[in-house]
């Protein structure tokens, strides 16, 4: 078993555990707290997770310079880089916590809250502030473990946190506890446990042996400070691009609409999380190949990743798209959200599109090409935000889905164009004949599936048809994984 496959399967198993708990969480919490209260919780703790990106570039810097240290073994440079990253992380955690405190004090006016939601706004955001503090602090240890390829080890210990999360849900479900404050406290406690696990693993694996850490930032401009600053700017722009959707909906509409949006886009965010989990395994290798200026091997490896992940993710999106309404009804035990299923399917298109350029995007993000990404994002993200706000005001939460899709379309074209200049990409590296055939096959299966959902009334025939289509998609995905040989070492053997 290759190390890549071991790490990837470990990441995905942990994500499946999170996925299962996440699927249980929404209906249980929705019933326990109500739409408005749960919407406030989703807004506060969703933002606390999203704001981890605002760590002044600390986590990205830790990843980049850890990988670089594994290549050049320059201990002094790495010590300075990591000291800067840790210092920035602590300062960011404090600043972000203060922002959440401010939102808690002025949340009633900011989110147009009334009744019980206005009463509990301050304590919920206070706890979200604490949660964001520990999440931001924990980002650097997590990146250190991932840069050193300790994915499997870390994941095995992180199951403790998932078990605690499940216990909290069971308390809501079986014990009749409907106090959102107690549940929020439990989430903060789990974040602290996760941080302590990562710190313990770093100590046991002696990752920082020989490294002298100081709580300070270099006064003069260095490659570390420049990269961290650019990564921080990119994090702000990225937040406005995707993570601000709930904030826009909560301020333009109401917290109840945040709950509806979270339901319809649940498959979208689950798939985004899954792909992020998977790509974290490939990131150290991609970055190392780029640092070594091995363009041919890098391009071969990146193209394999793109072809494989696109077909697998598109297959998953196809299954979700075919069974979207049925899934919502089974999940929530109501069909009241089914009329919005089309927008959930449209959001899945965005995930598929990102698979066409993610390796190049992430490589640029962790190298000197970050400035190129930053310049483009400063142009296209405001377009997304303006479109999202205007369309949300006019038509509801659908506006943020359209805004995100437009940005990803523009981003895909830009990154692939840059990849032609930076990595000598030819479109035939990605769009091979087998790839095109699989893509069209999945597209046809989706059309057939949606036609069957709309026209077949006999449940037995419909279920057997769906099973046949799903099995076909599984075979296509497995065939792609086998043919591409993604889990072999990235040896330069041509395309």
Image (tube, rainbow, N blue to C red):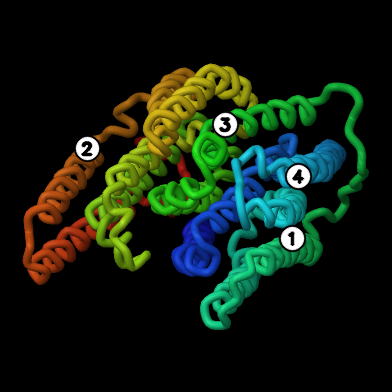
Q: CA distance from mark 1 to mark 4?
A: 28 Å
Q: Residue furthest bottom?
A: 175
Mark 1: secondary structure: helix
Q: CA distance from mark 1 to mark 3?
A: 27 Å
In the rendered structure, the answer to whether residue 324 lies left or right of residue 208 reads left
Q: CA distance from mark 2 to mark 1?
A: 44 Å
Q: Earlier in the sequence, mark 4 or mark 3?
A: 4
Callout 3 crowding tier (Cα within 10 Å): few <14, some 14–19, many ≥20: some
x and y percentages locating residue 215 in the rendered image: 92, 43
Residue named by callout 1: 195
x and y percentages locating residue 65 in the rendered image: 73, 39
Q: Earlier in the sequence, mark 4 or mark 2?
A: 4
Residue named by callout 3: 240
Give yes or no for contact between labels 1 and 3 (Cβ–Cβ under 8 Å).
no
Q: CA distance from mark 2 to mark 3?
A: 33 Å
Q: Earlier in the sequence, mark 1 or mark 3?
A: 1
In the rendered structure, the answer to whether residue 67 lies left or right of residue 464 reads right
Residue named by callout 2: 436
């Amino acid at each position: 078993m290759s190390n890549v496959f071991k790490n990837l399967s470990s990441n995905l198993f942990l994500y499946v555990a999170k996925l299962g708990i996440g699927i249980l969480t929404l209906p249980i919490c929705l019933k326990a707290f109500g739409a408005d209260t749960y919407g406030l919780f989703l807004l506060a703790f969703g933002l606390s997770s999203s704001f981890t990106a605002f760590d002044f570039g600390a986590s990205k810097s830790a990843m980049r310079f850890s990988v670089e240290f594994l290549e050049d073994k320059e201990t002094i440079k790495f010590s300075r880089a990591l000291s800067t990253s840790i210092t920035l992380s602590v300062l960011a955690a404090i600043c972000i916590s203060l922002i959440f405190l401010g939102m808690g004090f002025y949340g009633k006016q900011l989110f147009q809250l009334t009744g019980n939601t206005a009463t509990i706004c301050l304590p919920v955001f206070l706890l979200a502030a604490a949660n964001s503090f520990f999440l931001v602090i924990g980002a650097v240890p997590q990146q250190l473990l991932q840069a050193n390829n300790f994915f499997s080890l870390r994941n095995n210990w992180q199951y403790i946190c998932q078990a605690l999360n499940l216990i909290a849900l069971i308390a809501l479900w079986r014990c009749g506890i409907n106090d959102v404050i107690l549940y929020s406290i439990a989430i903060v406690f789990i974040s602290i446990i996760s941080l302590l696990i990562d710190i313990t693993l770093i100590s046991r694996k002696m990752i920082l042996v020989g490294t002298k850490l100081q709580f300070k930032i270099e006064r003069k401009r260095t490659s570390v400070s420049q990269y961290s600053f650019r990564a921080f700017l990119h994090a702000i722009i990225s937040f406005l691009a995707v993570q601000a959707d709930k904030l826009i909906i909560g301020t333009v509409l109401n917290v109840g609409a945040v709950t509806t949006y979270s339901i319809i886009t649940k498959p979208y965010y689950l798939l985004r999380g899954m792909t992020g989990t998977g790509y974290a395994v490939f990131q150290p290798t991609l970055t190392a190949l780029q640092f070594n200026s091995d363009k041919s091997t890098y391009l071969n490896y990146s193209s394999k990743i793109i072809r494989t992940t696109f077909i697998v993710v598109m297959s998953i999106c196809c299954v979700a798209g075919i069974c979207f309404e049925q899934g919502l009804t089974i999940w929530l035990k109501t069909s009241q959200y089914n009329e919005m299923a089309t927008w959930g399917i449209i959001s899945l298109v965005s995930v598929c599109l990102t698979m066409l350029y993610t390796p190049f995007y992430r490589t640029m993000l962790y190298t000197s090409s970050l400035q190129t990404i930053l310049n483009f994002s400063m142009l296209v993200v405001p377009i997304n935000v303006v479109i999202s706000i205007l369309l949300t005001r006019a038509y509801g939460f659908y506006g943020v889905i359209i805004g995100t899709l437009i940005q990803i379309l523009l981003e895909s074209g830009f990154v692939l164009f840059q990849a032609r200049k930076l990595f000598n990409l030819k479109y035939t590296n990605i769009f091979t004949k087998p790839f095109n055939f699989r893509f069209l096959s999945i597209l046809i299966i989706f059309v057939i599936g949606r036609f069957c959902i709309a026209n077949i009334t006999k449940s037995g025939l419909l279920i057997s048809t769906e099973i046949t289509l799903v099995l076909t998609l599984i075979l296509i995905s497995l065939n792609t994984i086998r043919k591409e040989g993604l889990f072999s070492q990235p040896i330069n053997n041509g395309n």
